[in-house]
Amino acid sequence: MSISVNPMAWDNAWDGAVNLHDLGGLPLDDGGTTAPGRVWRSGAPEPITPTGWAEALEAGLTTVVDLRNPAEIKQARDRMPGSARPNGLVTRNTPTEDPGDPHFLETCGPWLDHPRSYAPNIAMYPHLIGSAFRALADAAGPTLVHCAAGRDRTGMISAMLLSLTGVEHEAIAEDYVQAFRGTTHRGGGITYDEEQGAWVQHPGETWTAQQLDVRVRERRGALLGWLAELDPVAYLRYAGLDEGRITALRGRLRSGEPWPEPGTRAARTRAGRES
């Protein structure tokens, strides 16, 4: 079965944005597609220019859910000290892992860039995953969710949200593949070195087309296997979300509670009241 994802959704529509994608336009199990302009996913937002942030506000963005750890955020801001986002945006920092936890490093360390890490990650940290979804559920309007590359932590949270919404699993997998291909060149960053048993600076690497295809096949299969076992409603209940928030999340990319139209004064005012 071949699933196509709208290529227009995978562009850097906000100037400077990295690996940016609108989660709208994905096929639902019961017909129709997800609503555009409600949730975006991306890599770290520090490269977004003032023009790009203006474009994001015009698109209706009210909330940023940052899945990175404090050390990553500090590193990104040290590298780009001039980066700044509009005052009206609400930012929620909700890391999905504890990088100092030996159990996490032993279990997930070898698979930090692979969906094989998703099942143990969410099993270890329901309180952290629950916080990320609580931030998504409580957002006043359209939301950006991101990590560093916009691939695996963002892919994990996005896949869970899309599964809860009722998006076809093949389409969820294709959404992940597009994000993975969006990081064909891995820039430098913090990574876990198993031999040293420590977090180290990664210099970055570039994959050939053949190497990339092999990695895509491995990860796509692992993601589909994880989705087949995942019950997102049961998990979110276990993670402490109440039924109201779960219902809101389930409808967020469908109809859900209506939000102000993108780019309107009401949308920006509503966001500003939460900042």
Image (tube, rainbow, N blue to C red):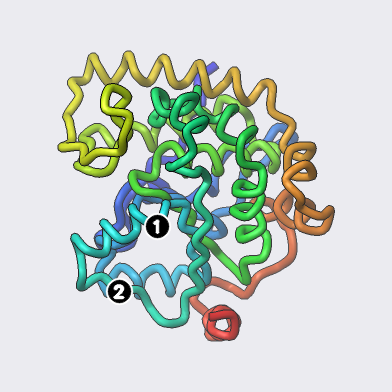
Q: Residue type at mark 1?
A: Pro
Please indicate whether residue 223 sits to the left or right of residue 127 in the image. Answer: left
Q: Please name the residue that numbered disc 1 is placed on.
A: 70
**Within 10 Å of the Cα at label 1, are there few (<14), some (14-19), or many (20+) other Cα atoms?**
few
Residue 54 is labelled as none
Provide the secondary structure element on which disc 2 rests: loop
Please indicate whether residue 24 sits to the left or right of residue 100 in the image. Answer: right
Residue at image location 56% in from the left, 43% down from the top: 157
Closer to the camera in the image, 74 or 215: 74
Closer to the camera in the image, 174 or 95: 95
Q: In this view, does 33 lie above or below 193?
A: below
Provide the secondary structure element on which disc 1 rests: helix
**Within 10 Å of the Cα at label 2, are there few (<14), some (14-19), or many (20+) other Cα atoms?**
some
Q: Is residue 198 above or below residue 229?
A: below
Residue 84 is labelled as 2
Q: In which quarter of the image is residue 123?
A: top right
Residue at image location 59% in from the left, 27% down from the top: 119
Instruction: Looking at the image, tell me whether mark 1 or mark 2 is earlier in sequence order.
Output: 1
Q: Residue type at mark 2?
A: Ala
Closer to the camera in the image, 28 or 114: 114
Residue 49 location in percent, x, y? 25, 68
Q: Give me the C-alpha separation between circle 1 and circle 2.
A: 17 Å
